[in-house]
Image (tube, rainbow, N blue to C red):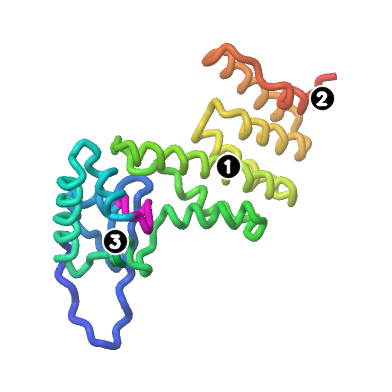
Amino acid sequence: MTTDPPTPTTGDDPLPEVSLHLLGGFRLLHDETPVVVPRGLQRVLALIGLRPGATRSHLAGLLWPEASEDRALSSLRTALWRLRQDPCCPLVTTGDTTRLDPRVRLDVDDLTSTAARVRDGDDPGSAATALAGRHDLLPGWYDDWVLLERERLRQLRLHLLEQVSRNHLAAGRHGEALEAALEAMAAEPLRETPHRLVVRVHLAEGNVFEAMHAFYAYRDLLLRELRLEPSPAMSALLHDTLA
Protein backbone atom coordinates (compact mmCIF):
# COMPACT_ATOMS: atom_id res chain seq x y z
CA MET A 1 0.00 0.00 0.00
CA THR A 2 1.32 3.42 -0.87
CA THR A 3 0.30 7.02 -0.28
CA ASP A 4 1.92 10.36 -0.88
CA PRO A 5 4.84 11.00 1.50
CA PRO A 6 3.43 12.03 4.89
CA THR A 7 3.96 15.48 6.32
CA PRO A 8 6.20 15.42 9.40
CA THR A 9 4.14 15.44 12.58
CA THR A 10 4.70 16.00 16.25
CA GLY A 11 3.57 13.84 19.12
CA ASP A 12 0.70 16.26 19.79
CA ASP A 13 -0.84 15.85 16.34
CA PRO A 14 -4.17 13.98 16.23
CA LEU A 15 -4.33 10.50 14.78
CA PRO A 16 -5.05 10.46 11.05
CA GLU A 17 -8.57 9.77 9.87
CA VAL A 18 -8.85 6.47 8.04
CA SER A 19 -11.91 5.40 6.07
CA LEU A 20 -12.64 2.28 4.07
CA HIS A 21 -15.26 2.52 1.33
CA LEU A 22 -16.74 -0.64 -0.15
CA LEU A 23 -19.97 0.74 -1.65
CA GLY A 24 -19.43 1.66 -5.27
CA GLY A 25 -15.92 0.23 -5.31
CA PHE A 26 -12.92 -0.24 -3.04
CA ARG A 27 -11.31 2.92 -1.64
CA LEU A 28 -9.04 3.29 1.36
CA LEU A 29 -8.47 6.89 2.45
CA HIS A 30 -5.84 8.13 4.88
CA ASP A 31 -6.63 11.72 5.89
CA GLU A 32 -8.66 11.95 2.64
CA THR A 33 -5.63 10.79 0.65
CA PRO A 34 -6.24 7.64 -1.42
CA VAL A 35 -4.09 4.67 -0.50
CA VAL A 36 -3.05 2.40 -3.37
CA VAL A 37 -3.84 -1.19 -2.38
CA PRO A 38 -3.10 -4.16 -4.67
CA ARG A 39 -6.22 -6.06 -5.71
CA GLY A 40 -5.30 -9.18 -3.76
CA LEU A 41 -4.91 -7.18 -0.55
CA GLN A 42 -8.12 -5.30 -1.27
CA ARG A 43 -9.99 -8.60 -1.00
CA VAL A 44 -8.41 -9.29 2.39
CA LEU A 45 -9.22 -5.84 3.78
CA ALA A 46 -12.76 -5.91 2.41
CA LEU A 47 -13.54 -9.30 3.92
CA ILE A 48 -12.09 -8.33 7.29
CA GLY A 49 -14.24 -5.21 7.24
CA LEU A 50 -17.37 -7.18 6.40
CA ARG A 51 -16.67 -10.04 8.83
CA PRO A 52 -15.38 -8.40 12.01
CA GLY A 53 -14.10 -10.88 14.54
CA ALA A 54 -13.85 -13.78 12.09
CA THR A 55 -11.10 -16.29 12.80
CA ARG A 56 -8.16 -16.60 10.46
CA SER A 57 -9.32 -20.06 9.38
CA HIS A 58 -12.70 -18.65 8.41
CA LEU A 59 -11.17 -15.74 6.50
CA ALA A 60 -8.71 -17.99 4.69
CA GLY A 61 -11.44 -20.43 3.69
CA LEU A 62 -13.55 -17.65 2.17
CA LEU A 63 -10.65 -15.98 0.37
CA TRP A 64 -9.09 -19.16 -1.03
CA PRO A 65 -11.95 -21.68 -1.10
CA GLU A 66 -10.25 -24.05 -3.56
CA ALA A 67 -6.96 -24.25 -1.68
CA SER A 68 -6.16 -26.65 1.14
CA GLU A 69 -6.55 -25.26 4.64
CA ASP A 70 -2.79 -25.07 5.18
CA ARG A 71 -2.23 -23.34 1.84
CA ALA A 72 -5.07 -20.88 2.45
CA LEU A 73 -3.77 -20.01 5.93
CA SER A 74 -0.28 -19.54 4.51
CA SER A 75 -1.64 -17.17 1.86
CA LEU A 76 -3.52 -15.21 4.53
CA ARG A 77 -0.41 -14.91 6.72
CA THR A 78 1.52 -13.56 3.74
CA ALA A 79 -1.22 -11.05 2.92
CA LEU A 80 -1.43 -9.82 6.52
CA TRP A 81 2.35 -9.49 6.69
CA ARG A 82 2.32 -7.38 3.52
CA LEU A 83 -0.42 -5.16 4.91
CA ARG A 84 1.47 -4.61 8.16
CA GLN A 85 4.56 -3.36 6.33
CA ASP A 86 2.74 -0.13 5.61
CA PRO A 87 2.24 2.50 8.35
CA CYS A 88 -1.28 3.01 7.00
CA CYS A 89 -2.24 -0.56 7.87
CA PRO A 90 -5.76 -0.31 9.35
CA LEU A 91 -5.79 -3.71 11.10
CA VAL A 92 -5.51 -4.96 14.66
CA THR A 93 -5.03 -8.58 15.69
CA THR A 94 -6.23 -10.21 18.89
CA GLY A 95 -5.47 -13.88 19.32
CA ASP A 96 -6.79 -15.72 16.28
CA THR A 97 -8.92 -12.84 15.00
CA THR A 98 -8.08 -9.85 12.84
CA ARG A 99 -10.35 -6.82 12.49
CA LEU A 100 -10.27 -3.23 11.35
CA ASP A 101 -8.72 -0.74 13.71
CA PRO A 102 -11.53 0.98 15.70
CA ARG A 103 -10.52 4.35 14.23
CA VAL A 104 -11.33 3.15 10.70
CA ARG A 105 -14.69 4.40 9.43
CA LEU A 106 -16.44 1.85 7.21
CA ASP A 107 -19.21 3.09 4.90
CA VAL A 108 -21.09 -0.21 5.24
CA ASP A 109 -21.29 0.38 9.00
CA ASP A 110 -22.72 3.86 8.37
CA LEU A 111 -25.51 2.33 6.30
CA THR A 112 -26.35 -0.43 8.77
CA SER A 113 -26.31 1.92 11.78
CA THR A 114 -28.63 4.34 9.98
CA ALA A 115 -30.99 1.48 9.17
CA ALA A 116 -31.04 0.46 12.83
CA ARG A 117 -31.82 4.01 13.98
CA VAL A 118 -34.64 4.38 11.47
CA ARG A 119 -36.05 0.97 12.38
CA ASP A 120 -36.03 1.86 16.07
CA GLY A 121 -37.70 5.21 15.42
CA ASP A 122 -34.77 7.22 16.77
CA ASP A 123 -33.94 8.91 13.47
CA PRO A 124 -37.15 9.15 11.43
CA GLY A 125 -35.90 11.82 9.06
CA SER A 126 -32.53 10.31 8.23
CA ALA A 127 -32.51 9.70 4.49
CA ALA A 128 -29.08 11.16 3.78
CA THR A 129 -27.10 7.96 4.29
CA ALA A 130 -29.62 5.83 2.40
CA LEU A 131 -29.81 8.26 -0.50
CA ALA A 132 -26.03 8.64 -0.62
CA GLY A 133 -25.45 4.87 -0.63
CA ARG A 134 -26.56 4.45 -4.21
CA HIS A 135 -23.83 2.03 -5.19
CA ASP A 136 -23.72 -1.73 -4.89
CA LEU A 137 -21.16 -3.39 -2.70
CA LEU A 138 -17.86 -3.90 -4.55
CA PRO A 139 -19.27 -3.92 -8.11
CA GLY A 140 -17.36 -6.22 -10.44
CA TRP A 141 -16.38 -8.60 -7.62
CA TYR A 142 -17.95 -12.05 -7.85
CA ASP A 143 -16.67 -13.93 -4.82
CA ASP A 144 -19.45 -15.87 -3.12
CA TRP A 145 -19.04 -13.88 0.10
CA VAL A 146 -19.33 -10.61 -1.84
CA LEU A 147 -22.49 -11.71 -3.67
CA LEU A 148 -24.16 -12.72 -0.41
CA GLU A 149 -23.26 -9.50 1.37
CA ARG A 150 -24.17 -7.40 -1.67
CA GLU A 151 -27.70 -8.79 -1.69
CA ARG A 152 -28.05 -8.35 2.07
CA LEU A 153 -27.08 -4.69 1.83
CA ARG A 154 -29.28 -4.14 -1.22
CA GLN A 155 -32.29 -5.43 0.69
CA LEU A 156 -31.29 -3.43 3.76
CA ARG A 157 -31.15 -0.21 1.75
CA LEU A 158 -34.47 -0.88 0.02
CA HIS A 159 -36.23 -1.47 3.33
CA LEU A 160 -34.50 1.57 4.81
CA LEU A 161 -35.67 3.83 1.99
CA GLU A 162 -39.20 2.51 2.27
CA GLN A 163 -39.25 3.05 6.03
CA VAL A 164 -37.87 6.57 5.60
CA SER A 165 -40.63 7.25 3.08
CA ARG A 166 -43.30 5.95 5.46
CA ASN A 167 -41.89 8.04 8.30
CA HIS A 168 -41.94 11.20 6.21
CA LEU A 169 -45.44 10.42 4.94
CA ALA A 170 -46.75 9.96 8.49
CA ALA A 171 -45.22 13.33 9.43
CA GLY A 172 -46.76 15.07 6.42
CA ARG A 173 -43.42 15.66 4.70
CA HIS A 174 -44.67 14.60 1.30
CA GLY A 175 -41.73 15.83 -0.77
CA GLU A 176 -39.23 13.90 1.33
CA ALA A 177 -41.49 10.83 1.35
CA LEU A 178 -41.72 10.89 -2.43
CA GLU A 179 -37.96 11.32 -2.82
CA ALA A 180 -37.19 8.25 -0.70
CA ALA A 181 -39.85 6.15 -2.44
CA LEU A 182 -38.60 7.12 -5.89
CA GLU A 183 -35.03 6.27 -4.88
CA ALA A 184 -36.17 2.79 -3.82
CA MET A 185 -38.12 2.48 -7.07
CA ALA A 186 -35.03 3.37 -9.10
CA ALA A 187 -33.02 0.73 -7.25
CA GLU A 188 -35.58 -2.01 -7.99
CA PRO A 189 -38.17 -0.96 -10.60
CA LEU A 190 -40.29 -4.13 -10.35
CA ARG A 191 -40.58 -4.06 -6.55
CA GLU A 192 -44.14 -3.14 -5.63
CA THR A 193 -43.63 -1.58 -2.21
CA PRO A 194 -42.07 1.72 -3.37
CA HIS A 195 -44.70 2.08 -6.10
CA ARG A 196 -47.39 1.72 -3.45
CA LEU A 197 -45.71 4.43 -1.42
CA VAL A 198 -45.62 6.76 -4.42
CA VAL A 199 -49.36 6.28 -4.92
CA ARG A 200 -50.01 6.89 -1.22
CA VAL A 201 -47.98 10.09 -1.23
CA HIS A 202 -49.84 11.46 -4.25
CA LEU A 203 -53.19 10.62 -2.66
CA ALA A 204 -52.14 12.25 0.61
CA GLU A 205 -51.40 15.43 -1.33
CA GLY A 206 -54.72 15.22 -3.14
CA ASN A 207 -53.07 14.60 -6.50
CA VAL A 208 -55.43 11.94 -7.81
CA PHE A 209 -54.18 12.17 -11.39
CA GLU A 210 -50.58 11.64 -10.26
CA ALA A 211 -51.66 8.66 -8.15
CA MET A 212 -53.53 7.06 -11.04
CA HIS A 213 -50.65 7.72 -13.42
CA ALA A 214 -48.20 6.06 -11.01
CA PHE A 215 -50.50 3.07 -10.55
CA TYR A 216 -51.06 2.42 -14.25
CA ALA A 217 -47.41 3.01 -15.12
CA TYR A 218 -46.45 0.28 -12.67
CA ARG A 219 -49.27 -1.97 -13.88
CA ASP A 220 -48.07 -1.65 -17.48
CA LEU A 221 -44.47 -2.36 -16.43
CA LEU A 222 -45.49 -5.44 -14.47
CA LEU A 223 -47.63 -6.80 -17.30
CA ARG A 224 -44.89 -6.18 -19.85
CA GLU A 225 -42.03 -7.66 -17.85
CA LEU A 226 -43.67 -10.42 -15.80
CA ARG A 227 -47.22 -10.77 -17.14
CA LEU A 228 -48.52 -10.10 -13.65
CA GLU A 229 -51.05 -7.69 -12.17
CA PRO A 230 -50.41 -5.47 -9.14
CA SER A 231 -51.39 -7.03 -5.84
CA PRO A 232 -54.86 -6.52 -4.34
CA ALA A 233 -53.22 -4.36 -1.66
CA MET A 234 -51.99 -1.91 -4.29
CA SER A 235 -55.22 -1.95 -6.27
CA ALA A 236 -57.12 -1.20 -3.07
CA LEU A 237 -55.28 2.11 -2.74
CA LEU A 238 -57.28 3.47 -5.68
CA HIS A 239 -60.51 1.59 -4.99
CA ASP A 240 -62.37 4.58 -3.56
CA THR A 241 -61.00 6.89 -6.24
CA LEU A 242 -62.03 4.63 -9.11
CA ALA A 243 -65.38 3.59 -7.61
Q: Is residue 186 found inside the magenta-colored segment of the image?
A: no
Element under disc 1 = helix
In three-dimensional space, the C-alpha distance between marks 2 and 3, rounded to whole angstroms, equals 63 Å
Q: In this orientation, which residue lies closer to the viewer: 207 or 73?
A: 73
> For mark 3, what is the residue?
96
Q: Are marks 2 and 3 in contact (CB under 8 Å)?
A: no
Is there any visible trace of residue 33 in the rendered image?
yes
Element under disc 3 = loop
Q: Are marks 1 and 2 in contact (CB under 8 Å)?
A: no
Q: Which residues are magenta?
A: 46-54
Frontmost of labels 1 and 2 is: 1
> For mark 1, what is the residue?
159
Q: Position of residue 239 (x, y in %)?
A: 81, 23
Instruction: Give me the residue at 24% from left, 59% from top.
Output: 34
Q: Position of residue 86 (x, y in %)?
A: 16, 66
When asked about the image quadrant of residue 30, the answer is bottom left
